[in-house]
Image (spheres, helix red, strand yellow):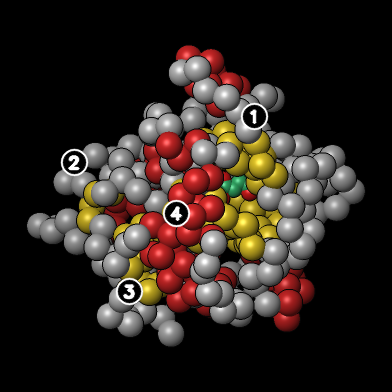
Amino acid sequence: MIKKINLTNEIDAFNNNGFVIFDKFLLEENIEVLKNRFNDLFDGKFENTIEPDEWNWKKNLSDPSATRQICNVWKSDNLIRKIVCNETIGLIASKLMEWQGARLVQDNILWKPSGGKTLGYHQDSSYIDWIVPQTMISCWMSLDQTSQKIGTLEFVTGSHKWGLSPPTVNFHSPDDYRRELINFAKDNNKELNITYVEVPPGGASFHHGYTWHGSGINKTSLNRRAIVSHCIPSNAKFHSTNIGGTGKIYKRYKKLNTNEMDESFFPILWNKEGYQTFN
Ligand SMILES: O=C(O)CCC(=O)C(=O)O
């Protein structure tokens, strides 16, 4: 599924920049299969008949030029589960964040068609005040050749050192996808140095949950599709009271009388004892 990777200079690069980019990550043999799977999933055809937790874009109902997104597809599709729960992602996430292990908090599949609209700049960790500690790392895997022109994912270099702001209000299709970022930079006297994730099909990036990121309009005639595995520490717990951001959906998986997270809903990808929920 995923190429084995030995981290060398990437740990320093991640600590300095708040992200790291791999040209080769998903094995080539997966790419066409996954593209076909995207057609089914966005048509509402789910292998396990279970519906994903968030179905933000629905065919014939939603804006056809919006970036299409479905969240927690791993529950609906076994191939997506094998990708987003892959132990290599958990291992790299843990090494970069210096965690004892990593678990999946949520996945996304994203499809930005030709002319597809923006995703507003944001910091992923701002959406998880319902988790302790409020920290995250995300692995973004591309099925297509990406470029600035296709509206690829973009990061503000070093912005993981800027602390955490409240969640972005305009996430889906804002006219000015950098507005909240620019306001923050002005108010806090920060310089913006933007890096575009330009990778071949199967390339990937990992970004820190505090790293500001977003993406522009797809100005090409081609599709831009990606799969994202958002990870938290394997020993993370539910916050006993907070319910901001995505908590209004995912806190439904909190059991009575405990703040422990159940691996049935938040699977372990890798931990230093060698355990994985799915292998
Ligand atoms: O693919 C994109 O444009 C945005 C992805 C994103 O926000 C993420 O992976 O956290």
**Which label was assigned to residue 271?**
3
Amino acid type, mark 1: Tyr
Point 35% across, 48% down: residue: 135
Marks 2/3: CA distance?
27 Å
Mark 2 Cα shell of 10 Å, populated few (<14), some (14-19), many (≥20): few
Residue 227 image point, x, y percent: 60, 61
Crowding near the residue tagged with mark 3, few <14, some 14–19, many ≥20 C-alpha atoms within 10 Å: many
Write down the residue under mark 4.
137
Residue at the disc numbered 2: 241
Give the spatial CA distance, label 4 vs label 2: 23 Å
92 horizontally vs 273: left or right? right
Q: Residue at x 32, y 81 (%)?
A: 275
Given the current orientation, which residue lies at the most extreme top position? 187
Amino acid type, label 4: Ile
**Tag 2 near tag 1, CB within 8 Å:** no
- Is residue 208 visible in the rendered image? The answer is yes
Asked if residue 48 is positioned above or below residue 161 in the image, the reply reads below
Q: Which residue is mark 1?
A: 177
Q: Secondary structure at mark 3?
A: strand
- The answer to whether 238 is drawn above or below residue 219 in the figure is below
Q: Cβ of disc 4 within 8 Å of ligand 1?
A: no
Q: Is residue 57 visible?
A: no
Query: Which marked residue is nearer to the observer: mark 2 or mark 1?
Result: 1
Mark closest to the chain's N terminus, 2 or 3: 2
Among the 4 quarters of the image, the one containing residue 161: top left
Q: Nearer the viewer, mark 4 or mark 2?
A: 4
**Which of the two residues, 23 or 269, is positioned nearer the viewer here?**
23
Labels 4 and 3: the sequence-earlier one: 4
Quarter the C terminus occupies: bottom left
Inter-mark Cα distance, 3 to 1: 36 Å
Tag 2's secondary structure? Answer: loop
Residue 62 coordinates in the image, percent (x, y) = 67, 42
